[in-house]
Amino acid sequence: METKRLYLRKLQISDINALRDILQDKEVMYAYEHGFSDEEVMQWYEKQQYRYMQDGVGLLAVILKSEDKLIGQCGLTLQDYKDKKVYEIGYLFNKSYWHNGYALESSAACKEYAFKQLKIDEVYSIIRTNNYPSQKVAERNGMTVKDEIIKHYYNIDMPHYVYSIKNPLI
């Protein structure tokens, strides 16, 4: 996928250092309640590789064209919601690149890809209730709150809003 300022591609092993910069930053990872260890970074990377093979989707490297540099991740992942699997648009960015519209630009490209290429009828973003910046991205991407759920992660009950948007082409 490509936008005006970005291109998105599958993660590569050479991206590990840039991933580490993102995933080990406690401020970036506040929705996860901790910065990741080196082992957790590798597990994250391997999980995306598995998703590419198993699901045909996953979080992608977001590359800033002007710097040819990985600045974040964005993509579609299959997530459990109630009694089904749904396609979720997720995103994480290096904090040096926050507040530049990159999350919206890349997530809008993922939504368009999901609707036009994959013919998915609805996409979701499942976002912690205290993650206001990600909520704003979802809203600017045309999503609205559909539900509120509790996810259990890192031995913590975490309330999440379930945002979604239906495919207008179907």
Image (tube, rainbow, N blue to C red):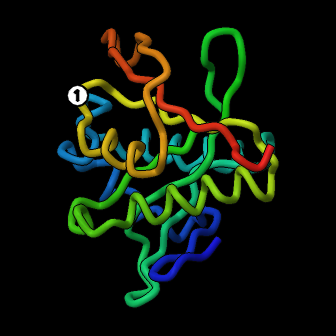
Task: Please name whichever residue, 100 or 154, is drawn nearer the observer in this view of the structure.
Answer: 100
- 17 to the left or right of 12: left
Where in the figure is residue 158, as x and y percent of width and height? Answer: 33, 15
Asked which secondary structure carries label 1, the reply is loop
Q: Amino acid at mark 1?
A: Asn
Please say if 169 is above or below 55.
Answer: below
Please say if 66 is above or below 6.
Answer: below
Residue denoted by label 1: 130
Question: Can you name the residue that lies furthest to the bottom here?
Answer: 66
Where in the figure is residue 117, as x and y percent of width and height? Answer: 80, 58
Please say if 61 is above or below 86.
Answer: below
* Quadrant in which residue 83 is drawn: top right
| Residue pictured at 39% horizontal, 31% vertical | 127
- Location of the N terminus by quadrant is bottom right
Binning the other alpha carbons within 10 Å of mark 1 as few (below 14), some (14 to 19) or many (20 upward) gives: some
- Location of the C terminus by quadrant is top right
Task: Please name whichever residue, 11 or 6, is drawn nearer the observer in this view of the structure.
Answer: 6
| Residue pictured at 38% horizontal, 68% vertical | 71
Task: Please name whichever residue, 9 or 119, is drawn nearer the observer in this view of the structure.
Answer: 119
| Residue pictured at 57% horizontal, 59% vertical | 60
Where in the figure is residue 80, as x and y percent of width and height? Answer: 63, 20
- 42 to the left or right of 128: right
Where in the figure is residue 169, as x and y percent of width and height? Answer: 77, 49
Q: How many numbered marks appear?
A: 1
